[in-house]
Image (cartoon, rainbow, N blue to C red):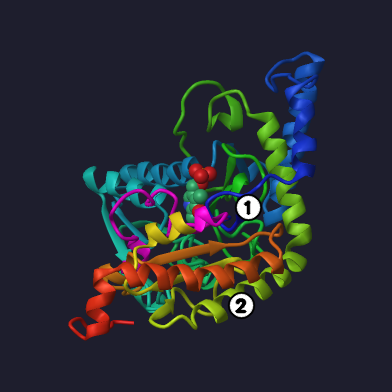
Amino acid sequence: MIYLDNAGTTKMDDKVKAAMLPFFDEEYGNASSLHSLGQRAKEQLEKARAMVAAAINAQPYEIYFTSGGSESDNMAIMSMARMGKFNNKKHIITTKIEHHAVLHTMQKLEDDGFEVTYLDVKPNGIISLADLKKAIRPDTILVAIMYANNEIGTIQPIEQIGKICKQKHITFFTDAVQAVGHLPVDVKAQNIDMLSLSAHKFHGPKGVGALYVKRGTPLFSLIEGGAQESNRRAGTENLAGIVGLATALQIAVKEMDKTNAKLIKMRDKLINELTKIPHSILNGDRNIRLANNVNICFEGIEGESLLLLLDDAGICASSGSACTSGSLDPSHVLLAIGRPHEVAHGSLRLTLSKYNTMEEINKVIKIVPKIVDYLRKMSPVWDELEKGERKHVI
Ligand SMILES: *Cc1c(COP(=O)(O)O)cnc(C)c1O
């Protein structure tokens, strides 16, 4: 099997699994217990917190462990919204290309009387800083802009966004789930006030993540109960998961340069070869994108059919976000960069990891054009395009 769906989730690193195993076994203590088993758990919890903090240049007390990226996104946004309610500030700025964990939370807040500005992105999938500046109002409580996009891999100008928010005294939250472990992150240098990350996107376990919150930024809890995580996130800590997260992040940061150099070679080969297919187009900026992301639209085909045939050939790919696959709506991200509906339907996302090889990439380069050709031959839409009854848009 060739696994090319690493923006969906990643294979756990064996070293991460080994670091987690003791916590399913003899080290089963609850970090809130006063006995020695509990205290050992507490020590490991705090060690993991310090490791995560070090990876993003934060302080350990600025790290809150959660159940993953979605919870961290919800917690950051809902917390700032609650603060906004107290101060009578009800405007939030975000983008049209955020993950659903952000977009659906924003919709909930709109139902609750908040006003949300959804910034457009340029055709290359990157926001305009001028648009951001124009959107800021006296009652803006939060700017929520993702670091790197999960579908098209584009990277936003985080440091400049951080600077603008700092000048205007507005809290800046970034969903960095696709960036942490893949790109250098420095919350201080980049003026980030809140940041979410998730272990399973960098070869850690599923169901565990973290939220970084800069000291002095208000933080309200989403889950009530015990006093864990400085009273901000109740529930007995998922210690095995947290140790797995910290270990995976440490490895990812250490290997980052080497991994990215390898990924860029494979990514560029895929992009160069697959965009040779007639009437295909790369989605997202050619260079300002994650080292592991390839996203291409092929005119005249359905992405879902392409996926099924690739699966038959032993290749795991995606047509967009994991959440949208299975639904008939085209990707909101592809629509935001200006792809027409019918083109957005024909998308293929290939996302790589350190476990992929050039040999695998060479196989994919051979198979994809054949499948696209096969599907086009069967497609009534392609037939119309070929006969000139319908105009090519790409
Ligand atoms: C995967 C992902 C999430 C959700 O993270 P989970 O840990 O799966 O809840 C949020 N944002 C982005 C950009 C993602 O890629």
Judged left or right of residue 78, residue 72 is right
Query: What segment carries the magenta color?
Result: 310-335
The residue identified by callout 1 is: 1
The residue identified by callout 2 is: 268
Q: Given the image, on which type of amino acid does mark 2 rest?
A: Asp
Considering only vertical position in the picture, is 20 above or below 383?
Answer: above
**Quick check: is 331 in the magenta stretch?**
yes
The spot of residue 262 in percent (x, y) is 72, 70
Considering only vertical position in the picture, is 86 above or below 102?
Answer: above
Judged left or right of residue 253, residue 91 is left
**Dot 1: element:** loop
The spot of residue 381 in percent (x, y) is 25, 72
Q: Earlier in the sequence, mark 2 or mark 1?
A: 1
| Quadrant location of the C terminus in the rendered image | bottom left
Decide which of 281, 189 is in the foreground and name it: 281
The spot of residue 192 in percent (x, y) is 55, 59
Decide which of 317, 216 is in the foreground and name it: 317
